[in-house]
Structure formats: structure tokens, C-alpha cells
Amino acid sequence: MTYVPGSAPDLDAADPLAPLRDRFVGTESDLVYFDGNSLGRPLRATAERIGGFVVDEWGGRLIRGWDERWYDQPLVLGDEIGRVCLGAGPGQAFVGDSTTVLLYKLVRAALGGAPGGRDEIVVDTDNFPTDRYVVEGIASELGLAVRWVEVPADAGITPELLAPALSERTALVVLSHVAYRSGWLADAAAITAQVHEAGALVLWDLCHSAGVVPVELDAWGADLAVGCTYKYLNGGPGSPAFGYVATRHLGLRQPIQGWMGHRDPFLMGPGYDPAPTVRRFISGTPPITAMLGLADMVALIDEVGIAAVREKSVALTEYAAGLAEELLGPYGVTVASPRDPAVRGGHLNLHHDRMREVVAALWERDVIPDYRDPGGLRIGLSPLSTSFAEVEAGVRAIATEFSERVGRS
Amino acid sequence: MTYVPGSAPDLDAADPLAPLRDRFVGTESDLVYFDGNSLGRPLRATAERIGGFVVDEWGGRLIRGWDERWYDQPLVLGDEIGRVCLGAGPGQAFVGDSTTVLLYKLVRAALGGAPGGRDEIVVDTDNFPTDRYVVEGIASELGLAVRWVEVPADAGITPELLAPALSERTALVVLSHVAYRSGWLADAAAITAQVHEAGALVLWDLCHSAGVVPVELDAWGADLAVGCTYKYLNGGPGSPAFGYVATRHLGLRQPIQGWMGHRDPFLMGPGYDPAPTVRRFISGTPPITAMLGLADMVALIDEVGIAAVREKSVALTEYAAGLAEELLGPYGVTVASPRDPAVRGGHLNLHHDRMREVVAALWERDVIPDYRDPGGLRIGLSPLSTSFAEVEAGVRAIATEFSERVGRS
């Protein structure tokens, strides 16, 4: 298969996953959606059953729903995400809270379990803002230092870049598996081993990899992880995050001691006694309604297999990158993402100084990428809901916008 | 109107709010639901429009929904809850996270703003478990002391009980406006003034009062508050909590520094600079889908007025209490709640040593109260979805269960 302009129909015809696109809401329209990495499209199945959930489960079972199903749902769904998307055996993953809150809880938990005398948290400068802000806040409150690792804007963290930051002072390393701007795909296995070699723990942010890139938390030997569910797991706006704590760390304590993390929530007695399982990382009443879309998407990824999802993801991003070079390169647009798919996740960043106005104009014509400062147009290609034709239409629309603004070089 | 067995039909006929019951899912069935204070029934409007939300807003607007509406939704809905249910002027309330997480954030924020040298947090022994656990965890991590106030199991906190616990060491007082077991309704205005007199701050837990009992946060001079939305605000299982921070405290800092609390979330630059508004108390991406049911119920309460809701709530609980004394008293069941409606919220606690097995048997016959140890059957009467006939059927069913187990005294 060749990735040249005009080959979209052939690519779609040859794509065994192409028929799945119809399962998503809105794919019948001409809208070009390049933001599946910010908010995935809903499955039609979710739209159809969510009203039924309200009537039959919430309205029909009422408070009995907690005993019958909901109480265990954060762990049941955590195990499913773990099995299908994270390479995580049962009893380690859970769903609840926002990514930010889970980052706070798990960073605090990790620091409570770090070897004594270690006073540095290592983060890269291009990590997602919330990761940086959470770590800075915790470091400030605990009297620790943040050790920053500078990474190139069009790539990301490597063992070589990380090495100088690791020392006997390192307590915890917080990194994104896929960088939110460049799409850089870190060598998580190598970095996890490297961090362990330095005697520290590592927490992986999987927001931009869960559901699109194979993740192997257990095989990497990862310590902790968090991730979004509204991106490639199509959970809907603000759907709850997932967390992962390796079995060997289930004794760690997190700071937000709530009734749902208690050994026996309905005992309601004096004193907090944390559950001996991963349930101890849950705090309050879990958001059940908000888990429905996510559960549907995990089931679909399970049906297809994450390897096939990744294969299509690579094909889509390769096609987008090739088209961008061919059609947008002449206007001075550069691919500010790794060109080698082996070190690239599911999205691409295209750079140009005038990209902010171009993105605004694209939105007006129903072509929806993300803008990320400075000068970045982000193409996030959710593999099961995106066609090659959509990619080609979108890149051509970007070219049209540039042709109206900028001369070809 | 008389509150004697058999008067339910007359009471329902005279109830101007009775027709509203039809607006809730499931009210056409014979099920007796005494647990609206744990999980309110869904509105039919919510069931009908939630699928449409998935298709038209999430699926139709996709990422554009954030710019168009969702980004401000936690504050817009916070203001609505504030206006309709909390007596709170705009710019002080917000929606997001679980009650437990909000308790953590606001207790930590309050302690950061407490006068120096104060090292005690005051809590009553019958406060909801999560409030106690959160406070104990924070006290432990910050090296503060928890000062416990013992309260009677069938009543709750009063200025007289609180007085000996307050001193120049008190930093913060955390109390429930309505006690989760007894239903005791605290004199929040008097207690707030008393706490301020002692130079401390007060955080009110409104989980069991928001939407059923008039709350006047601004008039009380309250400092901070949190509350559930899945109880009397019918938001659905695990719907997000609300928080309130009085305008004069908007400079406080909360510890979970996330991108959505930043002054400019999409700047994504280095360093956390909190929003100058109540937005700073938000951490991660807010749970939009989970706010739909809640928004519908707040609109309904606005239509009716919280005073009318309270009036019906008092009538329902008075009827339930009267029936319980008449029909259950002979079996040794006692009303373990205040008998005076002026100091009682929207639920009643009935006590008997064999109540656990009675509640289990009631569930089998589609009569659904809550069980709360020790020996408590909790009748939570959501005013707009509960009829007097339902109350009478439920209390008669309890009587039948006791008649099969216990002799009349």
C-alpha cells in the first residue's frame, strides 16, 4: 500500500477495520475529525443504551444497583482496561476521579513508599501541564525538589536524556508514555528498568497511549500509572480516569481517605482502615453513569485487538505525515513529530507560525484539529472511527487554508 | 390534615406537588422507595434527553463542546445549585470530583488559610465516615489534632455540645448540616457565628440537606461547604459533588493543582498560576455527562421552590414518624430521630435490634429502605418523587415484617 495523495479510497478498501467506523456517532457526516485524541466520538451503542441505563438500572434497581453491580464496577472495569489495553493482570487497575486527582493520589502514594532520604521528583518539561502542576504542588508541600529534564519539542524522553537526572536523590519519575504535543512514544520498558536501576519508582501517564498504542505495564515492571478515558477510550466529556498500582505496591497509602477505600465501607465505624486490595486507591462514590461509554469502547477494542488498532493507527498517521509533507511542506509546514512510527503514538503535530489562525479557519469549515501552542496543529486519529478519506480531506483542507495565506516556497 | 394511618389518600389529594411524582422514572410501579436520600430516582426528562446529549452534544459538537458550553458548566451549574438550593450568590459554588475529594481539597484549603498556631480540627463522632476519615488523614499528614465532639445517636450537634471543643487552638470545624443517621438538623447560623467567635473556620457538609432543606450559606456567613448531588439532587449513581467557597476565601489554595484550575488552562505554560475565581478549586477535566441529571433536578426544584419542597418533606416525615409510632411502636421500634420537625432534615431513622434482618426481608418484597448500623432503618423521603400512599404502604410492610418476628408489647 502506498501513502501518496489520492490513495485514500484504496487504503479504505483494503482496511479490514473500515466497517467499524459506522459504529460511531456522526461518521456519516462530512465533518473531518482530527481530535479523537482529545475527545473520542461516542459509539452508537453507548448513545442507544445510556437512556436505558437511566431507566432500567439507575431508575429500576435504584439503591440496589450498588449491591448488584456498581460497587465492584470501578475494579471490574479497571481489570478490563488492564487486560485489553494496558497489559496489566487483574487486581491492579481501577476507575475513578479525574486524571489530575489520580495523579495527585498516586504520586503521593509513591512518595510515601520511596526509599528514605530521596528528595527529588523527575519530570520532563514537555509533560502535560496537569502532570507538571501536580508534581510541583506536591514537591512544594512536602519540601521536595522537582528535577526537570529538557526534551526536544519534536521528540521526547529517552534513556539518554533521563540518565543525568537520575541519582540516589531520585524518589519518583513521572513521564508520559506518549507526549501530548509531539506524539513521541517513549521506550517505557527501558526507562522503567533504568529508573529501577537508580533505586526509584516510575509513574507512567498513559493519557495519550491507552487504547491506541499497546501498553505492557506488567512486562515493563511499571510501578504506577494513570490515564484518561475520554480520548482513545471514548468515555465522553470528563469520563473518569483509570489508575494502576503494581501488585507489589498495594500496601502504599494514598492521602484522600474516603469511605469507598475502606476495608468495609458499610461498617462506617471509627478510624480509616484501608482495603487490602487496589480498592484502597478509591476515595468517594464512583461515577457509574460516566463509565458506560468507556466500557463499550473497551469491549470494541477487545473485539478487534489492540495490535490491530495500533496497525491501523500507524497506517493513518503515516498517511497523514506523508500527505502533510507533500501538500503542506511547500508552505513551510513541518512535521513536529517523530517521522519513524516506531517512536510515535497515535497523533501528529504539524508546525507553522500561523497555525493558530489556520486552525480557527478550519473549524469554520468543519475540519476539527486541535491547536497547541506554539504553532502546533495536532492531528489525533482515533483508529476505529477515522477513515483514510477523512485524513486526506483534512490535509487537503489545511493546504487550502495555507494556499490562501502563504506562498509556496 | 391529620397524620393517622389511613389518611394517605387525603394527604395525596391535598398535596399540590403530588402531580410531580409522575415526572420520575418508576413511580408507576408498586415499589416503595425509602432511599431517595441515598440515590434519588431519575427524572424522566433525564432518561429522555441523555441519549440525545450523547448524539447531539458529545457526538455532534465533539471537542467544540468544550468551547461552546462544557468548560463553564461546573461554574454555571454551581451557580444554579447555589441560587436554587444553597442560598449562595454567584461565583462561589462549583461542581466536580466526588464529595470525598472535595472535602479533602477544601479542608486543606481552609487549613492553609487558618490563623497561625491553631492546630485542632473539630469533628463530631457521628459525622459521615468519609468526613471523619478525610479529616483524620489530613490531621495525620499535617501534624494536627482531631478534637472529637460526642453527639447523641438520636440527635446531633448543638452550640452547647460544640462549645467545650472550641478554643484558641481550633483551626477548622467540619460538621454535617443534617446528620446522616439521625436526621438531626443543626442550627447552622448559630454554629457558624459561634465558630467565628472562636476565630476558626467552618466547613458544612450539605450531603443530606441540599435539595430538601433550605440552606442559606451566605446568610449564615459559612466559610466552605461540600455536598452530594446523587441524593436529593437526583444526579445518578456517583454524580459529581458541589463545593462552595465564600467570596472572601477565594484566595485560598487547594492542593490538587490541575490544569483546569489554572488561570489560563490552554496556555499550558510552565508553573501553576491559580485562577482568581472559584475555578481554582477545580482540578481536572470536569465530568460533563454526569452533570445532566443533576441539572434537570435543580431546574425542577427551581420551578417548585425549595420552601415548598421542604414543606412537603416535613409533611412526609411527620406522617412517617406518626405511622411508625402507631404501627411499629408496639413491636419496640423507636424513632431514633428528632420528633420535632424544626430540628429534623428529610429522613427518619427507626431503631430496633433486629432491624438488619427486617430490612433484608423488606428488600425481598420491593420495599427499599436503607440499613445503617446499629439497628437503624432509614426512611429517606425524596419529597417530589414520594407519595403519602408510598409512605403508608412502606410502614405497613415494616409492621408486617415485625408481626412475623416479634410479639406486640
Image (spheres, coloured by chain):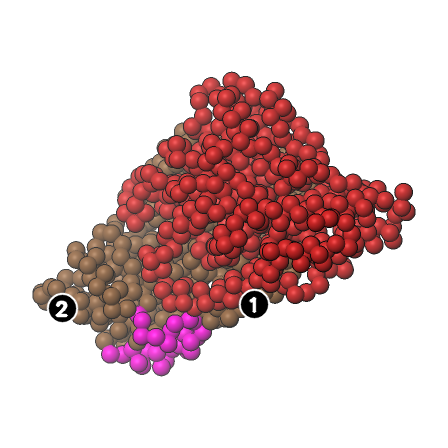
Chain colours: A red, B brown
Residue A167: mark:
none
Secondary structure under badge 2?
helix
- The residue nearer to you, when weighing B347 against B259, is B259
Residue A212: x and y, percent?
A: 58, 46
Q: Both on one chain, marks 2 and 1? A: yes
- Quadrant for residue A325, please give it: top right
- Quadrant for residue B39, please give it: bottom left
A386 on left or right of B135: right
Q: Is residue B337 visible?
A: no
Q: What range is drawn magenta here? A: B6-32
Residue A248: x and y, percent?
A: 39, 32
The residue under label 1 is which amino acid type?
Answer: Gly
A29 on left or right of B341: right
Task: Write the residue at 62% across / 49% down.
Answer: A312
Task: Please determine whether, in this image, residue A354 is positioned above or below residue A392.
Answer: above
Q: Is residue A19 visible?
A: yes
Task: Write the residue at 83% across / 54% down.
Answer: A400
**Residue bearing the label numbered 1:** B52
**Residue bearing the label numbered 2:** B403
Q: CA distance from mark 2 to mark 1?
A: 49 Å
Q: Magenta stretch: residue B21 in it?
A: yes
Residue B222: x and y, percent?
A: 47, 49
User: Could you classify mark 1 by the number of other residues whose Cα lies within 10 Å: few (under 14), some (14-19), or many (20 or more)?
Assistant: some
Q: In terms of sequence position, does the residue under pointer 2 or pointer 1 come before the other?
A: 1
